[in-house]
Amino acid sequence: MNPVSTAIDTTVPHSARIWNYWLDGKDNYAADREAGEAYLEVFPGIAVVARTSRGFLTRAVRYLAADAGLRQFLDIGTGLPTASNTHEVAQRVAPESRVVYVDNDPLVLAHARALLTSSEAGATEYIDADLRDTDTILSRAGRLLDFSQPVAVTMLFILHAISDADDPHAIVATVLDALPPGSYLALSHLGSDIFDEEAQRGFQSVVGRMSQQQYTGRSRAQMLRFFEGMELVEPGLVRIEEWRPDPGSVSDYKSTAWAAVGRKT
């Protein structure tokens, strides 16, 4: 693997590193922490959204491996490694699971060795690619994954970085079109219709001042379009913390994020 440290600009905040800061991670820099605090000032709940998103990843992947019987996973928009990465959750259920990670952040690439650990029975791979470059993602993922068999695709808190001009619905449809029936899609996304307007304005103001990436919230109706032609797994499209919460978990928190898992028919 080629060194990539020279490509990492630590003076400019990056969304993956800001997210890492909200998760109390160690892979962030002063610029990321400053931006993270600025977001928290206008939207204190964002750190809780980050943590509930990791919880959704764990629950969704566990469901896909244990209940749906999937053994192939394509994790697009991986982010920095933390506890309970996709391959760890899937391989705890089924050690033979194969997982391909996709991200275009140079710091994520620098940490790819941590992502590439695997059980002896399974396998993992990492692709350095932008979500918009579906041809590269599918061609390279196809080296490890068998696209004649069902694949679980996860796109967790990544589609908000894709503007409407880049047609995120077409991007998702292109990926799903390459997969057979019985494949699954797991999504989480900032919800424009469950996000307080004043907080949204403050949030976008910070984005404009401090971030290289945009955040495009989407409504419940826009979210459902990603699942056209699919069967939604119960409980359907809900706030992220409401998707199959672990037994005994109780929270009064109402997030500003939608989440769902769907099966291709």
Image: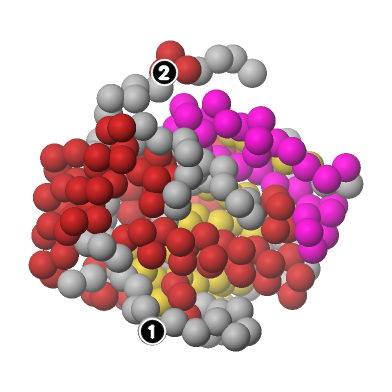
Amino acid, disc 1: Asp
Mark 1 vs mark 2: give the one in front: 1
**In terms of sequence position, does the residue under pointer 1 or pointer 2 come before the other?**
2
Residue under label 2, please give it: 7
* Residue 100 placement (x, y as % from top left): 66, 43
- Residue stretch in magenta: 91-120
Label 1: which residue? 252
Residue 209 x/y as whole percent: 13, 40
Residue 167 belongs to the span the image colors magenta: no
Image quadrant holding the N terminus, namely top right
Question: In which quadrant of the rendered view does residue 251 lie?
Answer: bottom left
Rendered view: 241 above or below 120: below
Rendered position, 80 above or below 159: above
> Of the residues shown, which amino acid type is indicated by label 2?
Ala
Crowding at dot 2, Cα within 10 Å, few <14 / some 14-19 / many 20+, comes out as: few
Front residue of this view, candidates 249 and 57:
249
Q: Nearer the viewer, residue 225 or 79?
A: 79
Find residue 220 and report its horizontal and vertical position in percent: 33, 75
Does residue 224 sit above or below 165 in this rendering? Answer: below
Horizontal side, residue 174 vs residue 180: left or right: left
